Every structure is written in structure tokens, then in C-alpha cells.
Amino acid sequence: MDPLGDSFRNRQIDIASLPDYEAVDFTIVSENYLQKINIQTGIFMLVCMFITGILWFFFLDPTQSILLLCVISLYFMFRFWNNYKLYKSLGFAIRERDVIYKRGYIFNKTTVIPFNRVQHASISRDIWDKLLGISSLKIFTAGGSGSDIGIPGLLPETALKLKEALAHKIVQDDF
Amino acid sequence: MTSKDNYQNPQRQSILGVVLIFLATLYKLVKMFWAMAAYLLLSNPSGLMLSYIGLGSVIVLLLILGYSYLYYLKFTFYIDYEREEFILQKGVFSTENIAIPFEKIQQVNFKRSILQRFINVYSLVIDTAGSNQKEVEINAISKTKANELSEILLRVKAEAKKNFDSEEIIAEEKEEKAWTFQLSISELLKIGISTNYLRGFSLIIAFLASIYNRLNSYFKEEIQEYETYFSQFSDVLQSIGFLFVLFILLLFLSVSITIIEVFIKYYGLKIVQSKERLELEMGLKTNTKVAIQPRRVQRFKVKTNPIQKRMNLFEAQISLSSSEDELQKNKIKIPGLKLEVLEKIKSFLYKDEDIALVDSYRPDKLLLLRRISVIVVLGFIALGVWFYTTFVSFNLFLPLCISILVLALIYQYYAFRTKKLIIGQDFLKKQYGLWTKTEEILELYKIQAISVQQPLWYKRKNLVNLSFHTAGGDIKFYAVSREVLPKINFILFKAEVSKRNWM
């Protein structure tokens, strides 16, 4: 009943000599992704400005509107700055046995998914991705939404290649 | 479109699928805009207006029809035998390309709604262990095709699985019973009384508060006339007596409700351990019967509180992998276990528990600081509320507030002290809880992924938040020193070299 059978060994492992997931070189994603999030934020900003304009015209007096405008501009300045920082912080790396994805400036988060735990991968492109010529790669595990990752801003060829490499790894690793 | 090529070339779903998509989109739009439409029609529109509305709806209908047709055209699926994947492409404005490796296919199901029955198509759903199960659904497919496709998928899945499942021959041996555990009625009663103590406790508080209120309002009224004094005093006594009866009744009711709940859920709880699995049976109304195999257990949680510990009652929670059978419960709660039984279950589930080479980690004081600051803010909010309402006198409010604050601080401090992450050679344990002591156990090779989080303000203190993702939920541990990271590498190593089946 021993699942390990004849190959059973139990050598001690020197933890300090194990490969460090932080020591990898991260690949950055396409700059078009920064454009995409900036466009999205920009559209949202225009909508907000438009609403402010309407409010100004019909309901508010100048001081109130200027105050509102200041708050909105500060918020969007923060958003654009955050977009830039977010883009800078995005990176992924493929090792022999796992994929590593980091994102976020204020909340930096790094997720490591071993290939033998990947359930499936998919490529998705929304309308902005299509216009800007990028794709995003989603990797799903059985660990639920917390451990699923979506790497945005990949060139379509890269995304496809990665997906195929992943599919290959998944199959290979199961033996 | 013949199926002779075994679905190697991209296929579309049945053309009748257009009807389904059309109706589904229409339904969504109607749900969004029915109020507006009703308003327009009820507002007594002029003839011109009516014709505009009519024209508008015709255009919208045509657009939806066009969209549905495009969606139908773009929705294709095929089997890639070379890469051993089932591939589905869909989406008009945004496209999605989903690939499912054969051996990740769990099940192929058919479904049929009334509408699908009406236009004689089936819905084919491919279950994977991944989280986005709904994504892989072909909504309109004819019966023959559905049968063919599911047959092919199940076949290739079986072939792909064979290659690495062979080590795991499911031997239908004669199962010997190792031990049996049964929960007696008196123990059920004990569980009932000791589980919902909070409800009883809150009842007692409410009772005392209302009595205090009555007495207070009585003594506040300055009563000068003796005649009314006595009659009023007896009134107060009467009302207190009434409250007392009410209190007893409610307490009795609350306790008996919990006992009834416990009986319905856990009556006849019986655990039988055989060689391969743990069989669990319980429940009065809906009889739950589960067979637990060690490899399917993703997470194991043990809970107890001082009262229950005195009575030798422990509660175990078992999270199973959440795929394969959706009808089966994913989290199983077993209350009222004796310590010996608990140890037996543990040793059955985790045969090779290794206590050597264990490291334990504690969270940084920053976490405590954050909790304390939340309490202090709450204190200020309470002060603010008091300031505006003044519902009790200040010299009552202040000591009350301060004592609650101090109690909360002490509680937080000791609760903080109980938080502990233990990483061994094969196991990971998380302990926490001051009153309800909880211990979660996870086998390292059952890890699905690990996330390491670092908010900006952790950087200076070199702290990180850890999430260990499993198929039975996440285990999180906050504000731990970066010194833990070599252990993360170790856990990843453990998961990556493991060839054991994790579910």
C-alpha cells in the first residue's frame, strides 16, 4: 500500500539550498497594458467630469463645484500614478516546475503555482486588448479564486506559446 | 458537419443555439429595461411616440438577432489530440480561448432546461477541478453529438488518467473494521448545552440590563407621597417578576432550540474506520453518509473551548476537495469527539506525521497594534454616539466604556499570543483562538498555490502575509517575518516533487 514503492528515500533536505522563488528574473508585460488601464481610467475620468459639469450647471454653486473638481482630480492623479506603479510592479517568471506572478505596488502580491497543480489555462482578450494587440493568460488551479492568476498585457504570440508550454508541462508532470 | 473526424476540426453548436442565445440576451435586456418600457407605455404616449418605440424595439430585436448569430458563429470547440486538450473558443467582443487537458476532465454532464427540451437540444457541461466550472458549457448540442462527444471525452480522459493512476489500484478487499465510535444521547445533550452558550449569555446580559433600567427609572422619579410609593414599588416588583419569568422561559427556549438543532444534525453520529476509509453517518432528518479517504482530505480543523475541553468534547471539521461530486458536502463537521477518538482519526488521516524538524512562527506585534487601534477607534465612536444621545449618565458610561476597552485589549493581547504557524517536514499547522481554540492542519503536498503579500507599510519591518491555497479553502497567516520565506521555497519544493494524488 506504500504509494512510493521501491523509490522510497528520505534524505534530509537542506532548506537554505532550495531554489528561491524571489531570485528569479521577472519578465515585464507589454507597455500596451499600461495604455489599456490608462484608457480605462481616462474614460472613467471623463464620465466623472461630465457628471460634475452637469451638477455644476444645474445644482451646485461655483465653490462647491470647484471643491468637487479638486477632489476628483486628486483622485484621478492618484489613479494614474497607481496605474503606472502597478504596471511597473507586474511581472511573471516561468521556472522548470512552476509559474510565478507578482503584481501590485501598494499591495504587492506574489503567487507561485506549481505546474502539477494547474488545472487548465485559457487566453482571453477583451475589446481593448484587441485594439492594442495584447492578450491575457489565465491560469486556473483547484485552489479557488484566491490562487487563480491572470497575467495581462502579453503579446498574443507569447500568450499562446505560454499556454502551450503550460499544457505541455501539465501533461509531462503528471507522470 | 459530420463527426467522423472525431471532433478534430472546430465545430459549432446546433444552429438552434441561436434561438437560445437570442432569448437569453433578450431576457437580460428585458430585465434591465422593463421598468423604462412600462413607464413609456403607461405614460400615455402619442401615436408618433408609439411608432418610435415600435421602430426602436424592432431595431433592438434585429441587433440582438445579429449578435446571437455572431455569437453562434464565434462559438467553436474541438479536440486537439496532439496536445491532448479539449478547446473551446467563444465571445463576440471579447474572445476567450479555453483549453482543458484530458486528464483534468472530471465529468461530462448533460443538462436540459424547458426551453432546451422544447427545441430538442442538450447542454453539455464539462466539469474540471478548476474554479470556473461554468465556463465550459456548450448550450445547444444535439443528442447524438452530445453522446458522441461525451463518449470521446470520457474515453480520452480515462486513457490519460491510466498513465499515472495505475499505481493506485482500487482494491476491493474485504474491509476490516478497525474501530467504531458512536455518539451517545447524553453527549449530544452536552454538545447542545455547550455550543450555543453565547446566545444564553447575551440573554442574561439583556435581562440584567432591563432590570437595571426598571429600577433606575423608578428611583429617578422623585416620589414624595408615601401612598403612591408603596403601590408603585409593588408595581416595579411585579414587573421584575414578569421579566424573570420571561427570562427563564427564553433561556429554556434558547437552550432547547440548540439541543433540537444538534439532535437533528448529529443524531446517531457514528464513525467506522476501515482499512481504506473513514465512514461517517449522522443526522435525523437528512441522513448524511460520507466515506472519507485520507487523500481527499484537504484541510483538517479541530476546535474546542475551555467548557467543552473539560467535558472532553472536540469538534473536527474536514474539508474535502470540492470537485467530482457536487452533491457531496465539501465541509464536514463532526462534533463531540473524545480526545482519544480525535487522535485516532488524526493518525488515520495523517499516517506519517513527523514531529521532528518543526519550526514555528508568530505574527509581528504590528498585527496586535492594528487590532488595538481598531478598538480605540471604536471607543471614540462610542464616545461620539454617547455625546450626541446621552442615553446613560456619564459617570456610568465612562467606567463601563473603560472596562470594556481594557477587557478587549487584554483579550486581543492574549488572542494575539495564541496565533502560531507551525511548519514541519510534511505538515503545516495554524493555531489560533483564545476562547475557541482552533488548530488547522494541512499536508504540504496538498498545497495548490502559495501567495505572499506585502503591503507597502510592511516593507520597513520586513513582514509578509501568507496564503496557502488548497482545494478545500485557504489558510492565511498575517504579518510574519520574511525569515519564513525559505520555508515557502521548501513547501513549493514539496508540492512540486510530489507524485502523490492530491484528491
Image (spheres, coloured by chain):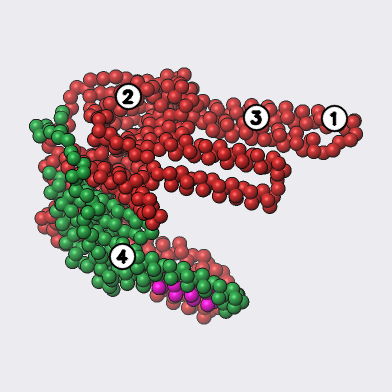
Alpha carbon of mark 2 to alpha carbon of mark 1: how far? 64 Å
Q: With respect to residue B60, does B455 lie above or below?
A: above
Q: Nearer the viewer, mark 2 or mark 4?
A: 4
2 or 1: tag closer to the N-terminus = 1
Residue B424 shown in magenta: no
Q: Residue at x 61, y 41 (%)?
A: B402
Quarter of the C terminus of chain B within the rendering: top left
Packing grade of label 4 (10 A; few <14, some 14-19, many >=20) is some
For disc 3, the marked residue is B247
Alpha carbon of mark 2 to alpha carbon of mark 4: how far? 50 Å
Determine the residue located farthest toward the front in the rendered image: B460
Residue B478 position, x and y percent, is 38, 45
Circles 4, 1 touching at the beta carbon (< 8 Å): no
Residue span colored magenta: A42-54
Judge if badges 2 and 4 mark residues of a common chain: no
Q: Main secondary structure of the magenta part?
A: helix
Judge if badges 4 and 1 mark residues of a common chain: no
Packing grade of label 2 (10 A; few <14, some 14-19, many >=20) is few
Label 2 sits on a secondary structure element that is helix
Q: Which mark is residue A88?
A: 4
Q: With respect to residue B428, does B259 lie above or below?
A: above
Q: Residue at x 29, y 57 (%)?
A: A102
2 or 3: tag closer to the N-terminus = 3
Residue B347 position, x and y percent, is 28, 26
Judge if badges 2 and 1 mark residues of a common chain: yes
Q: Residue at x 47, y 26 (%)?
A: B306
For disc 2, the marked residue is B343
For disc 1, the marked residue is B231
Q: Chain of mark 2?
A: B
